[in-house]
Amino acid sequence: MTGARGQLGRALTALAPAARGLTHADLDITAADAVRELVQPGDVLINCAAYTAVDPAESEPDAAFAVNATGPAVLARVCAERGARLVHVSTDYVFPGTGSRPYESDDPTGPATVYGRTKLAGEQAVLEFAPDARIVRTAWVYTGAGNDFVATMRRLERERDTITVVNDQIGSPTYALDLAAGLLELAGALGPGVVDPRIPRILHATNAGQASWFDLARAVFTGLGADPERVQPCGTEDFPRPAPRPAYSVLSGNSWAAAGLSPLRDWKLALNDALAAISDYPGPP
Ligand SMILES: NC(=O)c1ccc[n+]([C@@H]2O[C@H](COP(=O)([O-])OP(=O)(O)OC[C@H]3O[C@@H](n4cnc5c(N)ncnc54)[C@H](OP(=O)(O)O)[C@@H]3O)[C@@H](O)[C@H]2O)c1
């Protein structure tokens, strides 16, 4: 996998220690010659490398485009040339985020941010250049260790009496280890050998159910044994950000289930496991 030191890359490494994990220092995914040297026929390459800083991307579109669009294009071309299979990870931000029912994998896209536009361009390149590749969109990924939302809530629970968290953005919190297990199952279904035609080219994989950030924060406090009333709701307008956030970006699990892959469990069950396992979790480097 690429992006091995990122949040998802570390989760994959934890579950599949024998898999080859390429950090940014090992491989820049935009460098075609270096990619060509590493990818071998029969490989299944999971691309976890990305420019994921949603707000900075608004003022650094070229940097975001290089990693999120040029990089996947390079990987797709090389994988197609070499007879390797590519699993490319993408995001709910390719959608406008204004829906009111879970997004299906073939729903029209319409990103509202630079990050989302660059990720959509990456998807399009993968579809064009690597006929065997699969794209897996996910959302709201956390490990609870490092700087993600769950980790931040754990820290704020220790540091503050009360906090306010936005209650008008709805998504599907997704435990990185559950997503990693799903990606490994998908990778196993793709190769080597014949690609199962039931597996669509674009899939969605998140933990089941939906929540607001406020719901998730309260669930973290509850899971830590703290009083959830210490978390109070507020609106998006109380936290202005450079990049607009989707009001609703729940991803439907239908494409995943139709492909015969194991559904990811409910987000609350996953969060409880994540909180219980946090001391064992491989933290950021
Ligand atoms: N986190 C979420 O909530 C979320 C939600 C939806 C979708 N996703 C998608 O899930 C995937 C994994 O995200 P993540 O949360 O694991 O991201 P992450 O923690 O930011 O990790 C991304 C990794 O990519 C590496 N990278 C950056 N530029 C690179 C390049 N040119 N070549 C090779 N590696 C490069 C980074 O290394 P350096 O730091 O050393 O540069 C970093 O280790 C991404 O495709 C992301 O778009 C994430």
Image (cartoon, rainbow, N blue to C red):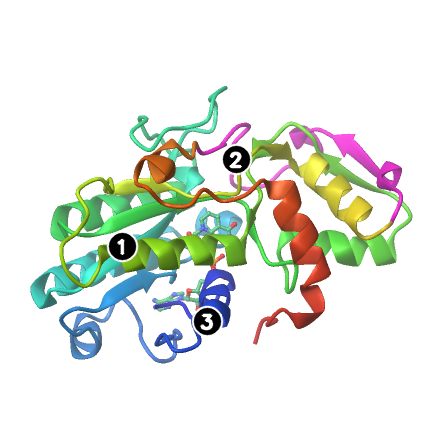
Of callouts 3 and 2, which one flags the residue occurring earlier in the amino acid sequence?
Answer: 3
Amino acid type at mark 1: Ala
Task: Specify few, some or many for label 2: CA neighbours under 10 Å numbering under 14, 14-19, or 20 or more.
Answer: some
Q: Is mark 3 within 8 Å of ligand 1?
A: no
| Quadrant assignment for the C terminus | bottom right
Q: CA distance from mark 3 to mark 1?
A: 19 Å
Tag 3 near tag 2, CB within 8 Å:
no
| Residue drawn at the location 58% of the way across and 71% of the way down | 284
Please give left or right for residue 108 compared with residue 127 in the image: right
Please give left or right for residue 76 compared with residue 160 in the image: left
Query: How many marks can you see?
Result: 3
Amino acid type at mark 3: Thr
Q: Quadrant of residue 251?
A: top left
Q: CA distance from mark 1 to mark 2?
A: 36 Å
Image position, residue 21 (x, y; %): 38, 75
Residue 244 tag number: 2
> Mark 1, mark 2: which one is toward the viewer?
1
Tag 3 near tag 1, CB within 8 Å:
no
Read off the residue under disc 1.
189
| Residue drawn at the location 37% of the way across and 59% of the way down | 184
Q: CA distance from mark 3 to mark 2?
A: 32 Å
| Residue drawn at the location 48% of the way across and 68% of the way down | 15
